[in-house]
Amino acid sequence: MTAQDAPTTAARTAVITGASSGIGAATARQLAAAGFQVVVTARRKDRVEALAAELTAAGHRATAYPLDITDRAAVDAFAASLDRCDVLVNNAGGALGADPVATGDPEDWRRMYETNVIGTLHITQALLPALTAGGDGTVVVLSSTAGHGTYEGGAGYVAAKHAEHVLAETLRLEIVGTPVRVIEVAPGLVKTEEFATTRFRGDTEKAARVYAGVAEPLTADDVADTVTWAVTRPSHVNIDLLVVRPRAQASNTKLHREQ
Ligand code: 8X3
C-alpha cells in the first residue's frame, strides 16, 4: 500500500465505545457498512448484543463486548481479548446536569470526568499497543463543541470536554512518528434519543427544550458520517480537529430557534 492509498478496511477492526445508542451506535453501523469488523462496547449488554446481531444479520462483521470503561481491570481484559485493533472510536461519555458553577453538584462533575476523560484515557492506553502494532492505527476522540468554548450552566461538562480535547491534542504530539493518527470530532447540537434526557435525569420536558424551535439539529447519523469520512481518509491524512454543527447554530451560545 502506498501512502496515497485509502486505508483498506478488509480485516481491519474498529472498536466503538458507548455503542448502545446515539452517535456510538450510528458510527458502528456506518463503519460496519464501510467494511470494518466492528466491536461494539457499552455498559448495557442487551443493547450492544442487539446491535451486533443486527449488523451480523445484515451481512457485516460485528461482535459485542459489554464494558464499563471506567473499570480499568475490565478495560485491560477487553484489550487482551482482541486479536487486533485498527480504529478506536472514543464515544462513551455524556453530560449530567446544567447547573451554574455556584450550585453545581460536585458528584456530577466527578462522574462526568470519570466517564468522559478517565474512561477515554483507560481504553486509549489499553489499545494503543495494538493500534501501533497493526501498523496503521486511528484514535478518534468524540469531544464536543463544549470542548472548545464554554456556556452558562455547562461548566461541569465543558470542563470534562476540554480535558478530552487536551488528551487528544497531547496524545497527537506525543505519538507523532508512530503509525497512529489522532482525530478529534467536536459536534455541536445533536438530537439523539438519550443525551439531553440523561443530562436532565429523565425530565423529557427539559430535554425537549434543548431542541425547541431548532429546525434541524444534527442527527447521530450526521456525526457518524463525519467520523466515517475522517477515518477513511488516506492513512497519511490526519483530520486533527473537525467541528460540526447544525446550520442553525453559529456558536455554543448562538442558536437560531423558529418562533
Ligand atoms: C453536546 C453539545 O452544546 O450540549 O456535546 O454542550 S452541548
Image: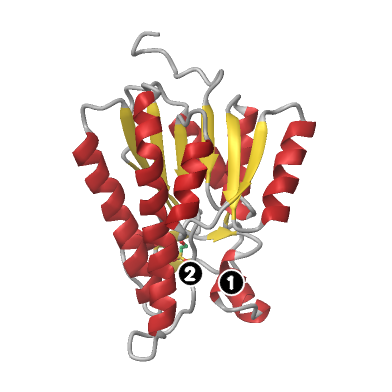
Kind of residue at disc 2? Ala
Mark 2 surroundings: few (<14), some (14-19) or many (≥20) residues within 10 A: many
In percent of width and height, residue 153 lies at: 40, 80
Q: Is residue 196 visible?
A: yes
Looking at the picture, the colour scheme in use is secondary structure
Q: Which of 112 and 191 is in front in this view?
A: 112
Who's the residue at 21% across and 32% down the image? Answer: 176
Q: Are marks 2 and 1 in contact (CB under 8 Å)?
A: yes
The residue to which callout 1 is attached is 198
Q: In this view, does 6 lie above or below 46?
A: above
In percent of width and height, residue 242 lies at: 38, 44
Outermost residue to the top: 1
**Picture quarter with the C terminus:** bottom right
Who's the residue at 44% across and 33% down the image? Answer: 230
In percent of width and height, residue 60 lies at: 70, 28
**Picture quarter with the N terminus:** top left
Q: How many labels does the image show?
A: 2
For the residues labelled 2 and 1, the Cα–Cα distance comes to 7 Å
Label 1 lies in ligand 1 vicinity (Cβ under 8 Å):
no
Q: Can residue 242 be seen in this view?
A: no
Mark 1 surroundings: few (<14), some (14-19) or many (≥20) residues within 10 A: some
In percent of width and height, residue 212 lies at: 61, 72
Q: In this view, does 78 lie above or below 180?
A: below
Residue 95 image label: 2
Outermost residue to the right: 57
Label 2 lies in ligand 1 vicinity (Cβ under 8 Å):
yes
> Helix or strand or loop: what does disc 2 sit on?
loop
Going from the N terminus, do you reach mark 2 or mark 1 first? 2
Residue 232 image label: none
Quadrant of res 2: top left
Kind of residue at disc 1? Thr
> Helix or strand or loop: what does disc 1 sit on?
helix
